[in-house]
Every structure is written in C-alpha cells, then in structure tokens.
Image (cartoon, grey):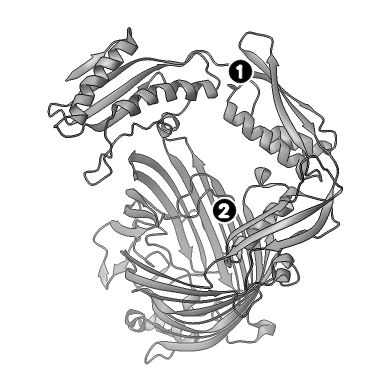
Amino acid sequence: MQLFSHPRGLPLLLCVLLAALAGCVEGEQSPVRVSSLKFTGVKAVKAGQLKDVLATIQSSKIPWGAKHYFTREQFEADLKRIVAFYRDRGFPDAKVRSFDVKLNDKQDAVDVTVNIEEGQPIVVEAVEYEGFEMLPPADLQGLKDRIALKQNAPLDRAVAQASREAALDEVKDHGYPYATVRVTERPGSSERARVLTFSTTPGTLARYGAIDVEGNTSVADNVVIRHLTFRPNRRFRLSQLQESQRRLYSLETFQFANIEPVIVEGEQPEVVPVKVTVTEGKHRKVNFGLGYGSEEKARGSIDWRHVNFFGGARTLQLEGSYSALSKGARLNLRQPYIFGPRYNLRTTAQSWHRTEPAYTLNTRGGQIALERTFARRGPLSRRQGTMTASLSYTNEFQSYRVTEEALRTPDFLKTLIALGLDPLNGRAQGRLSSVDFDIHRATMDSTINAHRGYLFDGHFERAGSFLQGDYDFAEMILEGRYYLSLGERAVVAVKARGGSIGTPRGENLTVPFYRRYFLGGANSLRGWGRFEVSPLFEGLSIGGHTMFESSAEVRAPIWGNLSAVVFADAGNVWNNAWAFDFGDMRYDVGPGLRYLTPIGPIRVDVGYQLNPIPGLLIDGEKQTRRFRFHFSIGQAF
C-alpha cells in the first residue's frame, strides 16, 4: 500500500505521513520495520556514505539479522541530515525533492525511497600555498600531490579540513612544533568557483628538550625512553613522536600510550620538552580459539603471553594448536631494542606434528631471528604501509614418514631410498641447519578482509653447505597480492606466488621429501583438494621442486555482511628446480560466499577444474568429479 508520493507541499505531507506511521509504531500494533531504504538522484556521493549518517536504518534481509524500526523523530531529523550532508560536500542547493513510503499488506514493514535533487556543486578552481618556504621544494610538491583536495572537484569541507591537517603535519615534521595552518577561500572566475589558500605561520624552529615519562609502574623510565626514535637536542619532527607511540603500543605492555610536546600558550622556546604518558596493561594474557574447516576439521588454539617478562619490555609467549593437519606447542621470547629501537631479537623453540596427504612430519628444534622494522620518513598523514626484514638461523631435527601408497609404488620407492628413507617403513630423519632471509611489505587496509593496498613477501633460505646439517639446498619464494576497491560495488583481489628449491648443482636428492611443493586446497587451486596438484607417479602426487600459483577474485556485497565471490585460479608444480613452464598450467573457476564476522569472513568456495589432471588418483581411485567444496574462516588470500 503506497501512503504518499508527491513532490509538492513536502512539509505538510511529511507531518501527515509521519503522524500516520507514528500511529502504527506507537499504537497497539507491532512496530513498523524498515524493510528497505533507497535513494534516487544520488550521483555525486555514494549511497552508502549517505546511509551512514542517517538514523533510519534498513533491516537485515537475513531472517536472524538485525531489525530496525521506523520512528517519526528519526526520519524528520534524517531529512535535515541529508541536506546538511550535501552542503558540507559542496552542494549548497541540494534538497529532498520528495519521498515515497510504502507499507506492506501486513502493515508491519515499510519501504522508504528518498528522492534527492543534488543541484550544481561549488568547485575548487585552484589551491594556493602561502608561507611554506621552509619546506624543501620536493617535500612541498609531495604535499601538493598528496592532499585530497583537488582542483575542479566539489568543495568538500571535510576534505578541506583533512588537507589542512596534512599540511600542518608536514610543517611540524620539519621542526616547527608551534606551527599553525589556516584555510581561506575567495570567489573564483565564476559564481560556483572558489580559490582555496593554505596559509602557515611556522613559528620557532625547535629541538627536543627533556623527556618526562608518566604512568609507568613496573616498566622503568629508561626502558620506555630507549624505544623512542628521538633524543634531546635533536630537531623536532612530528613523525618521530608518532612512530615512537606506535612502537610503545607494539610492545604489548601498555594499553595506552601518548607522546606530545609540552607547549605553553603564548610561548615558543627553541627547546620543547616532551611528555610520554603510558598506562600498563595486564602482564599476563591468555586467548583461546576454536574453529572448523574442511581441511583442518575441528581446531583449537591457546595463546599465553607474559609481557615485560623479567623487565625490559620483553615478551614470553607460549602457543599451542590442535587440528587434523597440525598439532604442537611453540615457545617464543621476543627481546626488543637490539642495537636500537627498530631491531628486535626473537628466539623460538617448538615441537610440532604435521599430517599432510603425502607425509607426516615431526619437528623439534628452534630458531633465532634478528628483525628490523623500516619506517618511512614523514608524518602518519603521508605514510602508507609497513616494511620489515629478518635474518634468522634455524636448527631443527626432522622426522618424517611418507604414505603407504608411495611405498607400494616400486619404481618411486627407488627415489625414496635415494632420499634416505627406510624402504620397510617409509621413515627418514635428519637435522636441518639453515640461514633464512625474509622481507615483508604491506599497505593493505586490513589483514583479515582487505579492500585496498598490496602485499609483497620474499623468502630466501640456504641449508647445508658450511652450515653442516643433513640437507643441502637453496630455496626462494616470492609472493605478491593486490587489492582494488570498486567503491561499494566490489573488491578485486589478485595473488601470484612462485618459488623453487634445489641445489646449485641441479641435484634434487639433497632436498628432503617434506620440502617438496604441492598445490591444491582451500587457499590454493580450489578446483582440487589439498596436495592434489603436483607431478604424478602412477597416479600418485609426489611433489616437485618448482611451483607457481595465481588467483583472481571479485568480491561483491549482497546483503549486510553477506557477499558473493567469483574466482579463477591457475598454477602447477614441476619436477625440477627452476623449471617454470607456463604452457603447462592447471586452471579452475568457481563461485563462493563470504559472511563477515568479528574474527574474519566465514568462507564457502566451490572450485571446478577446467583441465583435470590425467591419471590422478584420489584415495587410490581414479578421480570421478571435477569440483571440490571448501569451507573455512578467512579470505583465501
């Protein structure tokens, strides 16, 4: 039943309509649920942004989802919010032209459509800068390129304010803690054009003074101070205060940390004191986790940490995990501040068991790693991403056993014997002694459900040779991911990963069987099951020494937290080291669903093989179906 749809006499009709609806909401009948909320005429902004500022909220389409109800006061205020929203974004003539409201037959739900006339915007004709001579030309140009306020764009007040803050941060990062930046505007060459001017008064060029630490109880002042990236008598830089604050949080010892210069109004001394305020959190923490996946089945985990272990802000961590694929315990000790605040030393001891389709592996040993965090110069308003590098030494005793199917393959058994396996029980053991170098760079906006940014990981390992040990090989793996947001419509995600393992002499017999590559599974080529893509020997997957895999996904929202995915995967494993053959690839495609939760998306994927692997045996039988079903938590990448 349509209650009203009329462009004229809006205030009077609104009162009549809202009074009628109020009788439904406030009378003896059940509250009126907002079934849908739509807009027409919205072109310059995103409908989702407009919905975010309104109190009238659409109810979830899912039966068990959140329900939201229509109220007179909220809707009256929302119509004013719409006009204010547009005015702040450079559309002073925007107005609500009309609205359509329809009750369903049961009169317990309403569909609301708001018809908006945006009008013509006020545009930014030019952006000028005054008083920024203290900035090096390259930094000033970088500021101009970076700020969100752009020429010929609508004059968005929020964007203008954010741009002013970025300009202020840039001046403060060049030694001027007392700086101010104003934004003024004047008419442009037309009635709807404006020229904006950023004017700065830098104040006194200053350096750091005394550092005062407050709020710490068990952590000594010197421990806090040594994690700061600035020292007294050095030039003041805002970015160093911001980076130091993040470093204090990363210690996990403090639940609150704030660093700010001590500025007295009306005074601008050349030496500015710094105040560090912290609040210590609980020193002992424990977290439990439960989950289920089509590969891991039921899984559980425990993570116990003791921060500020024996002082020095070091962290002792004990973690345990149990699932159908892996189980074990690991002890980590992290020592911050080695050589400087950007270096950490991490020591690990573990006992772990893995059960894979091709083998079972027991690992006992440890690793020691020196980690360095790289900070990009400049305040946080101009920084993107993090970068870390680590150099580590691993010494572990490995004991593994291949499957019964491999032992029952006479010709392949010869290879296993050459690898050092006992032909009677398929077991082998040895000591891994290796040096590893890892590099990580990420700019993603989220680690569990990224919408934009990229990731790069590089892993380089050398085992044996002068390190002794029972294995001799070199390995390199590179991985890249890229995420592109298409507004509210979708997210495009792309991944590529490749690597090889072998010896400089081209021999493979010094590479243990458990280090061979296998693809397929929930996070790999989803048209196949775990470890099903690799070179075959009489139908059995035996792994290889070179691999490449890539994936592309389009993730689009459906209702609320539910979204749909279409994906395509490509990749393969080849027998010899550095034997990439991109003419010999396996491909799969498929759909999927994601439901966003606080711990990450619940994921369901169905992958279909475009070119099945001839002769592949699954549980000793020839493959009979070309699709695989995967259920897990977290995005595939």
- Label 1 packing within 10 angstroms: few (<14), some (14-19), many (20+): many
Disc 2 versus disc 1: nearer the observer: 1
Where does residue 484 sit, x and y in percent of width and height? 51, 41
**Above or below for 302 versus 451:** below
Number of marks in picture? 2
| Quadrant where the image shows the N terminus | top left
Quadrant position of residue 609? bottom left
Q: Helix or strand or loop: what does disc 2 sit on?
A: strand
What mark, if any, has residue 349 been given in the picture? none
Please state if 226 lies on the left or on the right of 536 as rendered: right
Where does residue 435 sit, x and y in percent of width and height? 65, 76
At a point 32% along the width and 53% down the height, the residue shown is: 605
Q: Helix or strand or loop: what does disc 1 sit on?
A: strand
In this figure, which residue is indicated by the disc labeled 1? 123
**Above or below for 177 versus 222:** above
Evaluate whether residue 147 shows in this view: no
Amino acid type, mark 2: Leu
Identify which residue, 64 or 423, lies in the foreground: 64
**Above or below for 213 versus 168:** below
Amino acid type, mark 1: Val
In this figure, which residue is indicated by the disc labeled 2? 455
Where does residue 607 sit, x and y in percent of width and height? 33, 53
Gap in angstroms between the C-alphas marked 2 and 1:
36 Å
**Above or below for 556 versus 103:** below
Identify which residue, 254 or 128, lies in the foreground: 254
Quadrant position of residue 289? bottom left
Identify which residue, 1 or 481, lies in the foreground: 1
At a point 73% along the width and 36% down the height, the residue shown is: 143
Evaluate whether residue 496 shows in this view: yes
Where does residue 314 sit, x and y in percent of width and height? 62, 74
Please state if 433 lies on the left or on the right of 320 as rendered: right
Q: Earlier in the sequence, mark 2 or mark 1?
A: 1
